[in-house]
Image (cartoon, grey):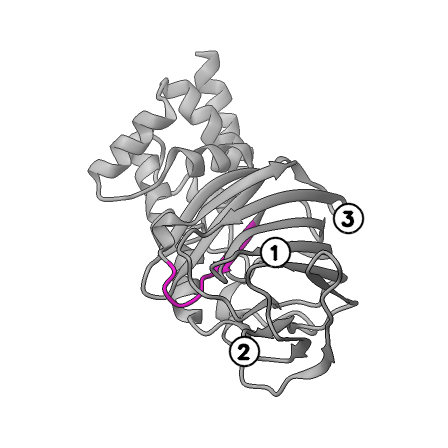
Amino acid sequence: MSDDRELKAALRDGPFHIALRVAVQTRGLTLDRLRHRLGERGLRVGTTSLSYWQQGLRRPERPESLRAVRALEEILILPPRSLMELLGPPRPRGRSSPLMPGAVAYSSILEPARALSALLEDLDGVADDRRLHIVGMHETLRIGADRSITRRETLQVVQAHEDAADRYIMIYWGDLGCDVERVRVRALEDCRVGRVRRDGPTALVVAELLFDRALRTRETQMIRYGLADPSGAEAHAYERGFRFPAGQYMLRVSFDPAALPVRIHRFARRSLDADEHDRGVLTLNAQHAVHLVAGPLQAGLVGVHWNWG
C-alpha cells in the first residue's frame, strides 16, 4: 500500500525520472525485462538508455523514444499519459533550433554529414549537443612505415555549459580504404567507452566517452582516449574539425624513419569548400616529428598536410 502511495505521489509531482524509477521498482521489473517487453512491441530501447532515463541523465525526446514512453505506461500499468505529461514540451534542438553564435553546421566541416546525423540520432539525438565546450585538446599521431596512421591519442579538457553533461561524442572519419569494423576506440583515462556506431560506406565511427559522473554547469572534465585503425590506408593529412569555437588545440605528428615525407605544412580553413589560410611550413625535428599550436579557435578545420614525394 505504501508503494502505491509513493507511486501516485511520484506520478503527480514528478520529475519524470523519479516517477519512472518508482514505477519500475513498484512493478518489480528489471530493466532487461522492460527492454524485452518493449522489443515485443517493435521498439528498440537499450537497457543503458532506460537506466539513463530513470537516473535523470537522459531525456527521451526522439519519436521512437516517446513511443517507448507511451508503451512503458501500458507495461507498468500506469494511467495514460501520466509519464508523458511529466516530460513537458521537448527541448529545442536539431535543425529547428538556431545555431549558437560562431557555430557551423556539420556539413561545413564533414562531407558525409547526412550519414553522421543518422549515427548521432541513434545515440539519442546529440547532433546539436551544445552542453560541452572544448577548453583544450592535445593530439598525438604516429605514422608508420606503411604510411598509415598507426596510433592516435587525444587528451582533452571539456567544460559544461549546463547541468547533466556526462559524456563526449567522439567522431572519426577514416581515410579511403578504412574498414570501420576494425576501428577500435579505447578509453585511457577518466572516461569509459559507451555505445559505438559505424557506417562502412562513409568510413564514419562515432562513440560515446562516458564520464564517471554528470557535470554541473562550468565544471570541467579531462579525458584521454585512443583510436586504432589497422586498415593500413595511406595518409596524406590529418585535420580536426571544430563545429563550435574552442580553446587551444595542439597536434604532434611523428613519422617512422623508414617513411619520411618530403614536404609538410600546417593549415586552417573555415569549411570544406574554403581555401586554406594560416599556412606555414613545418620542419621535422630530430625525433622525426612536427607539431602545431592553434587557439583560441573559431569553428572550422585545422591540421597538417604532407607529401610523400
Residue 309 bears which disc, if any? 2
Q: For the point 40% across and 57% down, which residue is it? A: 119
Q: Which residue is mark 1?
A: 141
Mark 2 falls on what kind of element?
loop
Q: Answer with mark 2 or mark 1, whichever residue precedes in sequence.
A: 1
Of tags 3 and 1, which is closer to the observer?
1
Q: Which residue is mark 3?
A: 218
Q: Is residue 257 left or right of residue 101?
A: left
Q: Which amino acid type is marked by label 3? A: Arg
Mark 1 falls on what kind of element?
strand
Q: Quadrant of the N terminus?
A: top left
Q: Are marks 2 and 3 in contact (CB under 8 Å)?
A: no
Q: Quadrant of residue 292?
A: bottom right
Give above or below for 309 relative to 208: below
Q: Which amino acid type is marked by label 1? A: Leu
Q: Which residues are the magenta region?
A: 169-178
Residue 141 x/y as whole percent: 61, 56
Q: For the point 49% across and 33% down, which residue is it? A: 54
